[in-house]
Amino acid sequence: MCEAVAPEVFQVDDDGMVQLVPGGEHDDATALAAVRSCPVAALRATS
């Protein structure tokens, strides 16, 4: 789900694990929306 919200920030690898896109350009609001959309609460945003 996070990949669908912010594909410029997150990608799912071949094993189904979420990874950060290296050098991905994003705004904080988009990244936070993606974190909040995670269906298993596996992501956390910190400042």
Image (cartoon, rainbow, N blue to C red):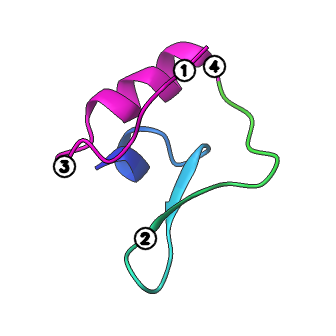
Question: Horizontal and vertical percent for residue 12?
Answer: 46, 68
Question: Horizontal and vertical percent for residue 9?
Answer: 60, 43
Circle number at residue 40:
3
Q: Residue drawn 29% across and 28% down?
A: 36
Given the current orientation, which residue lies at the most extreme bottom position?
A: 14
Mark sitting earlier along the chain (1/3) = 3
Local packing at callout 3 (Cα closer than 10 Å; few below 14, some 14-19, many 20+) is: few
Mark sitting earlier along the chain (4/3) = 4
- Residue 4 forms part of the magenta stretch: no
Q: Which residue is mark 4?
A: 27
Q: Identify which amino acid the numbered label 1 is placed on.
A: Thr
Q: Quadrant of residue 28?
A: top right
Mark sitting earlier along the chain (1/4) = 4
Q: Is residue 30 above or below residue 18?
A: above
Circle number at residue 46:
1
Q: Nearer the viewer, residue 19 or 11?
A: 19
Q: Residue drawn 32% across and 48% down?
A: 42
Q: Residue drawn 24% across and 41% down?
A: 41
Given the current orientation, which residue lies at the most extreme left position?
A: 39
What is the secondary structure assignment of the residue under circle 1? loop
What is the secondary structure assignment of the residue under circle 2? loop
Q: Is residue 8 above or below residue 31?
A: below
Q: Identify which amino acid the numbered label 3 is placed on.
A: Val
Which of discs 2 and 1 lies nearer the camera? The answer is 1
Q: Which residue is mark 2?
A: 17
Horizontal side of residue 22 vs 10, given as left or right: right
Quadrant housing the C terminus: top right
Mark sitting earlier along the chain (4/2) = 2
Q: Identify which amino acid the numbered label 4 is placed on.
A: Asp
